Amino acid sequence: MKFRRNPRFTASLLIFMMNIFVSRTFTCHRTEYVFGDECCPMCPIGTRVKTDCEEDKSTSCQPCREGTFMNKMNGLKKCLSCRECGAGSGLKMKTSCMIRSDTVCEPLEGFYCSEFTGYDCFEAKKHRRCEPGEYISQRGTSSTDTVCSTCSDGTFSNGTFTSCQNHTQCDSEGLKLLRAGTKTEDAQCGEIPSDWTGLIVGGVLGLLVLVFVLTAWCYRDKIQRCLKISKNL
């Protein structure tokens, strides 16, 4: 019994064998990288490839220059640029960039980290400011925002208190209530006069004396003529 050769099957088999051969040729160790048809040794952390390896020569590596870094074994020709912690993004430098590690940023005072990876912060936002009528129930940290809560009836806060304050009770302090307290302001109290009657009588008498003086001043010429006539009699 004779078997006919299938051209398509033969071609597929050849392609499959070639793929296996190529994949085996270019499969390098995890500490190597592919260069042409060679597996070159990677450069260590803090360095980059200066020249690739050859048949009789290994990879040549060079330390990263200032302002760049490399934090892993690599087969790259350039180191990575160091990151900058811009004040405009609410960040400041925590750890400076080294040839083996990138810059590490942290939030500025009054900011919290809104996006981070591990211990490195990539974006920060300003802490929330509580409004009048609210109190700071939880202060913001470098990783959490400020939490505000509303004051209950009979208490007030200007937004900077860590707890709402009770309104002043004017009666209990022997004072008169001038203006009732709100959630944003305390009650306003004033002194209570000790004797309203005395003040009223004194004011009336003072007014009468003033009227008498003004009247006498207006009729002083007539009074003087009357006095002269009485003397002549």
Image (cartoon, rainbow, N blue to C red):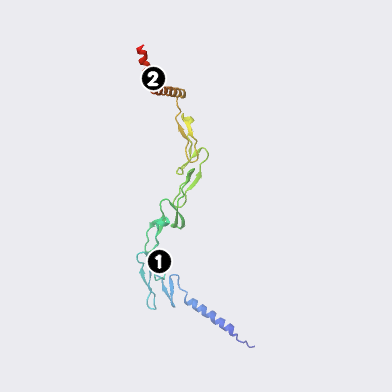
The residue at which mark 2 appears reads as 222
Q: Is residue 96 above or below residue 79?
A: above
Residue 52: % across, % down = 39, 75
Residue 134: % across, % down = 49, 44
Q: Is residue 27 above or below residue 140?
A: below
Considering depth in this image, is 180 or 15 the residue closer to the camera?
180
Q: Residue, x 41% and y 74% (percent of image)?
A: 40
Q: Callout 2: 10 Å neighbours few (<14), some, many (20+)?
A: few
Q: Is the residue under label 1 in contact with that under label 2 (CB below 8 Å)?
A: no
Residue 80's tag is 1
Considering depth in this image, is 51 or 146 the residue closer to the camera?
146
From the viewer's perspective, tell me whether residue 5 is left or right of residue 217: right
From the viewer's perspective, tell me whether residue 199 is left or right of residue 2: left
Which amino acid, mark 2? Lys
Q: Residue, x 43% and y 72% (percent of image)?
A: 32
Quarter of the image containing the N terminus?
A: bottom right
